[in-house]
Image (cartoon, helix red, strand yellow):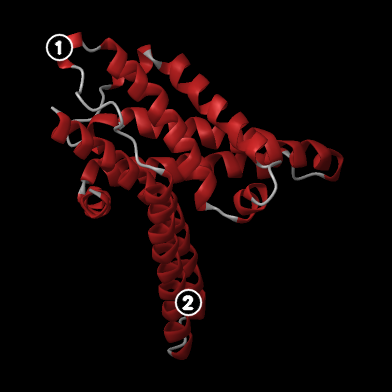
Amino acid sequence: MFWDSVLGGFGLLLSVRIWVGLVLYIVANLFTLGIGGALFSKDKTVAAGCLFTALVRPALGAVFISLFVVSLFPVMLGAKEAVGFQMIRTMLWPICAAGLIAFIIVMLLGFVPILGSLISESVTLPTFIQGVIVFRFFMAAVMASLPENEQPSNTNIYPGFWETIGYLLIAAVFARLAIFLSALIMAKSAQTGWEDKAENLGVIIGLVFGVVGGFLPLFMYVQHVHHALVTSA
């Protein structure tokens, strides 16, 4: 089931809806980054800017992750359609609350020895942890709403510790390859006199694959749940 979920996770990258969600997630984060830069660019607001960067923007980022997970919940589990806008609007408060809870949990995990340093030094690990927390929160609600005769026979539908580590390692290798690809493009372009455009392209590639590197292990995690539900049906 591990390799099936790995292939399924990569397979989700072929979905147009997944990429639309990823692009919207990136745009939303860039928007909050721009707002922070515009509002707190003066010397008098340096302290407020630091507070915004350390707390407000990461909290908003967790809410964006929650919106992404809930909106594409069916797609990640193998359906063709995403959650409709009307339902998202109806569930907006629980979605935001789940994102903020995930943010608080990750922030508290940052104080745990070793794990905290891994979270602080990684771009992808906080995204994965927050995505899993939100997914399991809403997955539990979905499972609880099912009639008893539709409950899966196998209640152990989530990946184990070592499987989760495997997903993270695969995503880390993927992210490293993306960084290598970005550096290679910049180096080759510099040789042809396109340094400025190469730098911008490298930043874009690094940003996109950095985001994908955070969501990819989440996709694999969800696909494991999908395969577990199918086999236990």
Q: Residue at x 16, y 16 (%)?
A: 150
Q: Is 46 on the left-hand or right-hand side of 213?
A: right
Q: Is residue 93 visible?
A: yes
- Classify residue 231 by image quadrant: top left
Crowdedness near tag 2: few (<14), some (14–19) or many (≥20) residues, C-alpha within 10 Å:
some
Q: Nearer the viewer, mark 1 or mark 2?
A: 1
Q: Residue furthest right?
A: 44
Crowdedness near tag 1: few (<14), some (14–19) or many (≥20) residues, C-alpha within 10 Å:
few
Q: Quadrant of the C terminus?
A: top left
Q: Position of residue 213 (x, y in %)?
A: 42, 55
Q: Is 31 on the left-hand or right-hand side of 95?
A: right
Q: Amino acid at mark 2?
A: Ala
Determine whether 192 is above or below 83 in the image.
below
Q: Which secondary structure, mark 2?
A: helix
The disc at residue 149 is 1
Residue annotated with mark 2: 183
Q: Residue at x 43, y 17 (%)?
A: 92
- Classify residue 153 by image quadrant: top left
Q: Amino acid at mark 1?
A: Asn
Q: Is 53 on the left-hand or right-hand side of 66?
A: right
Viewer-proximal residue, 55 or 120? Answer: 120
Q: Is residue 87 visible?
A: no
Determine whether 151 is above or below 78 in the image.
above
Viewer-proximal residue, 62 or 141? Answer: 141
Q: Position of residue 77 (x, y in %)?
A: 23, 35
Q: Position of residue 20 (x, y in %)?
A: 30, 43
Q: Residue at x 46, y 44 (%)?
A: 128
CA gap, disc 1 to disc 2? 54 Å
Q: Earlier in the sequence, mark 1 or mark 2?
A: 1
Viewer-proximal residue, 154 or 34? Answer: 154
